[in-house]
Image (spheres, rainbow, N blue to C red):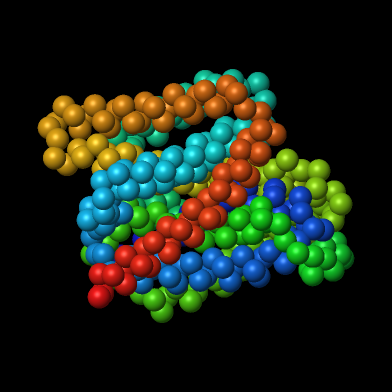
Amino acid sequence: MNRYFFYLIATNMLVNVIVWIPKILLRERFDGAIMAIPIGIVIGTILLFLFVPAINKFPNLGMPEILEETPGLFRFSFLTLFSIMWFLAGVITLLSFVDHLVEFVNPEMPSLLLIILFLILVILVLKYLNASKLLYALEILLVLNVPLIFVIMYQAYTNEYLTIDSILEVGTHFFEMPSWSALASVTYIFSGYANMVIFNRVFNKKISMKLLAVIPFIAIGNLFTSIFIPIGIWGADGVGELAYPWTSTADTLSIEYGPVERVITIFILLYVSIATMSILIHWHVALEMVKSMANVKKAGKIKRMVTDWGALLSFGIISVLLEMMTTNKSITILSEIWLNLRFPFEAVLVIFMFFLARRKKA
């Protein structure tokens, strides 16, 4: 089961390179974003190495089951708060996803219709696929997409217009102190492990601590690629004008003798599949927390069905309302606010799990 844990982290890394992290870090490329990378990696690694041994103490148990021994009000409040955080993670990805498609695929496409069609697909999948099947689907998706990722990276690193001088210019600002937003962005690269608060239910073996040592190095490569490739291609100043840095960067790449010449085509296919899976994972976690608060395990079939459909339809309605109320700029602002709030909430979650594990050991 170890590989599924890494799939959760990999999905989180990939989707956020495309959507949030480059936009925030490139905006602050002269104001501490470079220093945020090593600091954020250290913080993210510490949180990862605290969380995994803690969750290993509770095989086949999710957060709702772990909290059963706590007071009812605390359990309800805890699950409510974190279900909202996971729901927002999915809906922000969804809003960015729809905005991406309208911007780069068809500007005449009605975004409201697109999000409704997409929500129907997501809701049906969440209703009829359990955690195990979602992980199997994630494995298939990553196996199909990894070759596409390597194609894009190869084309980016070998691009004749990649300017090392622009990268070095930004690197001279290494000693600028990072902002909270920059640190929150970098640490979110690691945050796929937090989905184990629900997916741990299907893990019957402990996660290997030895394999965790690979993750910080992957994170370093992920961050440097996502930040410095756009800088190298667009220039230290020009990159700040891009709404979606990596999508615009992919649009400059081509495969001269490939079956698909424009890399943007491959990139959009990759983005659609990864973003869809990320939304499904986050909303599955949120849905399971909502169901746990409603005690559906002890309820009859009708109550379980009402809870499932009620929660999923609520997810859909809120998503549609947010789509009607937001623009490209407001989506970015909402994403940054959520990232800034997530950082301390995730730290609290990890510390709380750490103390629960120590208490169980005692």
Q: Residue at point 64% right, 59% down?
A: 183
Percent x, y for residue 314? 39, 27
- Residue 223: image quadrant is bottom right
Q: Residue at point 24% right, 36% down?
A: 294
State the residue in front, 12 or 179. 179
Residue 336 lies left or right of residue 320; in this view the side is: right
Residue 47 lies left or right of residue 139; in this view the side is: right
Location of the N terminus (image quadrant): bottom left
For this orientation, the residue located farthest to the bottom is: 210
State the residue in front, 194 or 133. 194
> How many numbered circles are shown?
0
Question: Can residue 158 be seen in the rendering of this structure?
Answer: no
State the residue in front, 252 or 127. 127
Percent x, y for residue 290? 31, 39
Q: Residue at point 76% right, 61% down?
A: 32
Percent x, y for residue 71? 26, 50
On screen, residue 248 above or below 358: above
On screen, residue 146 above or below 274: below
Q: Residue at point 69% right, 50% down?
A: 24
Location of the C terminus (image quadrant): bottom left
Percent x, y for residue 339? 58, 48
- Residue 157: image quadrant is bottom right
Question: Can residue 92 be seen in the rendering of this structure?
Answer: yes
